[in-house]
Image: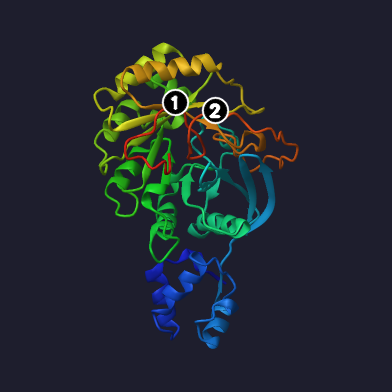
Amino acid sequence: MKVLTEYNLTDLQEELTSSGFEHYRARQILKWVYSKFVFDFDLMTDLPKDMRRTLKETFRVHTLDTVDRVTAPDSVKYLFRTRDGHLIETVLIKERDHLTLCVSTQIGCAVGCTFCATALDGLIRNLRTSEIVDQYLKVAEDIGGRIRNVVFMGMGEPLANYENLRKAVEIMVSPWGINLSKRRVTVSTSGILSQIRRMMEDDVLKDINLAVSINATTQRLRESIMPLTKTNTLKDLMDLLKRYPLRPYRRITLEYVLIKDLNDSEEDALRLARLIGKHKKRFKVNLIPFNPDPNLPYERPPMDRVLRFQKVLWERGISTFVRFSKGVDVFGACGQLRSRRPVVRSLNHEEPAQVGDGAGCNSLSGPPDKGDSRSGL
């Protein structure tokens, strides 16, 4: 059986006309699925009965089955099973005035960051377009409404699954699809240079938000904690980001996981400021205190050290925010997603401390950007 969410508008029009139906029916079908969240073809009442019968025999909408749903005060973590039996995790983040969905793009990850639990599983396979889109649809169906922000920060390296990511984003931002604002969609990458260059020329991806994990201020340390960077060097990455085309009031987010006694010194902060140099208006920095995981050897720095790192950057005119992760108590925070982890059921339901106005998968502290609607990151 074919999967409807593998099709963009053009693909579906061609599929329908080849089956003897009018091409304009494609927009009607996609409106039911992506605007009304109706997935039963029998309920698509503006379609002819014979067409509804053919659609039922030809297509299915969902590719994921919900295995479990774990709720905390600030987030909901969903565990989904793919048709071939693998597990993926998706996290719904509760913000003050909106919801953000943290979406996975791979089963496992091949980047190998030593501070990330997802890397412990290795890469099993890429998610298909339909599996990426279905995370949104399944959660929207569960909560009974739209989610306005999507961040590709879940399991996997999004740019290592470029074509499926691209098509999923097309479905999410197109008027015939979910119709999200491009300002509210963010791709987070470890910094694959060849794929970032592709994004720069890509009509679908070049205008969404870009977040890049830096995590170290010297090539030697970055290689040791992010093996991918041996062939995607810090210098080449920063040079490329300084040339990346940006629309007015848009900025690239540099993500920096702060790990106790590894990369959290004032000297590290000063080196990061030098890497940014005169391009202060092009970047903002998100500092992410390491999210603990029993399978990883690192610790979170004390708060005074985190704030000192932030202060060094602010004093040099660099917009810097501390992201207090949501979803920690369900292992749903940044760096904690893992397909082979048992489902967590014993939760701490105390409301976590929050600083500032939340965005992305976490909360931010510090003054807001000019022209930043707090979408994405």
Q: Is residue 107 in view?
A: yes
> What is the x, y in percent for residue 154?
53, 43
98 versus 32 height, above or below: above
Q: Secondary structure at mark 2?
A: loop
Residue type at numbered disc 1: Asn
Please give the residue where the numbered disc 2 appears in the rendered image: 115
Q: Secondary structure at mark 1?
A: loop
- Assess whether mark 1 and mark 2 are in contact (beta carbons under 8 angstroms): yes
> What is the x, y in percent for residue 197?
29, 43
Please give the residue where the numbered disc 1 appears in the rendered image: 215
227 versus 25 height, above or below: above
- Determine crowd level at label 1: few under 14, some 14-19, many 20+ residues with C-alpha closer than 10 A: many
Residue 326's image quarter? top right
Which residue occupies the extreme front position in the image? 97
Q: Residue at x 56, y 16 (%)?
A: 302
Q: Is residue 264 in view?
A: no
Foreground pick, 106 / 286: 286
> What is the x, y in percent for residue 58?
55, 77
Q: Earlier in the sequence, mark 2 or mark 1?
A: 2
Mark sitting on residue 318: none
